Amino acid sequence: MNSLLIVSELLQWLAIVSGAVVLLGLARQVGVLHERSAPLGALVTDKGPDVGEPAPLFNMRDFRGRPVQIGGQRSVGELQLLLFLSPTCPMCAKLLPTVQSFAAGEGVAPVIVSDGDEADHRRFLEEHDLGDIPYVVSPSVGMRFQIGKVPYAVLIDHEGRIRAKGLVNTREHLESLVEAHRTGYATLQQFIAAQRRPNGAAAPTPHAPAGS
């Protein structure tokens, strides 16, 4: 009987040690996956004006008749965020409160740009309170920026240059645009890739800050 108890205890300890080894291995793999999936920024998918280039300049009126300038010179340090959306896009509608909160927190001036049937826009504005955010309906703006998918955002600096852009579905995507601008890289993915390069390896050249 004593022998059976000893064997049972040994088997239990063997099972515990084996389980601990397996858990450590899993924890290590989770850490590796977490490192490889470092925060992804807004995905750039269009072929429009590139980051660092002047944004197309527009002077027009929004859906409510208020004057709106897209691109061009602004107050020093002021960033303009163009959000391209469709009034029939569920993801776009879901993103609106996040855009409002993000813009207020970051001090960014948002402008919503859309296209399509006027009735859809009226219904969209009745269902969603945009506050003072301009709502521009113009196919020419989307064509000049060559927007193919929505919701898509373009960040423009005070000198009227594009500093970041990409598809945005979350607040993290919006924040990645500002971070890309602050770091001087075209995208947050490019910045992360540069940080991972071994010492001595050539890193991609970031876009120079405006005015340099």
Image (cartoon, helix red, strand yellow):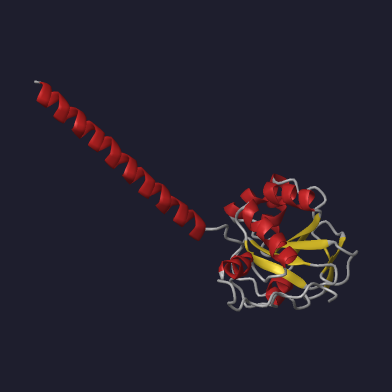
Quick one: 20 or 81, which is closer to the camera?
20
State left or right for residue 77 relative to residue 111. Answer: right
Report the quarter where the N terminus lies. Answer: top left
Q: Is residue 109 left or right of residue 89?
A: right
Residue occupying image coordinates x 46% and y 52%: 31
Across and down, in percent, residue 136 comes to 77, 62
Whether residue 134 can be seen here: no
Tell me if I can see residue 35 in this picture: yes
Tag count in the figure? 0
Side of 207 where 31 appears, left or right = left
Residue situated furthest left in the rendering: 1
x, y percent for residue 187: 64, 68
Give x and y (percent) for residue 39. 57, 57
Quarter residue 46 falls in: bottom right
Q: Residue at x 58, y 77 (%)?
A: 201
Which residue is found at the position 16% from the left and 27% from the top? Answer: 6
Q: Nearer the viewer, residue 170 or 120?
A: 170
Specify the quadrant of the image occupied by residue 163. Answer: bottom right
> Which residue appears farthest toward the top when viewing the image?
1
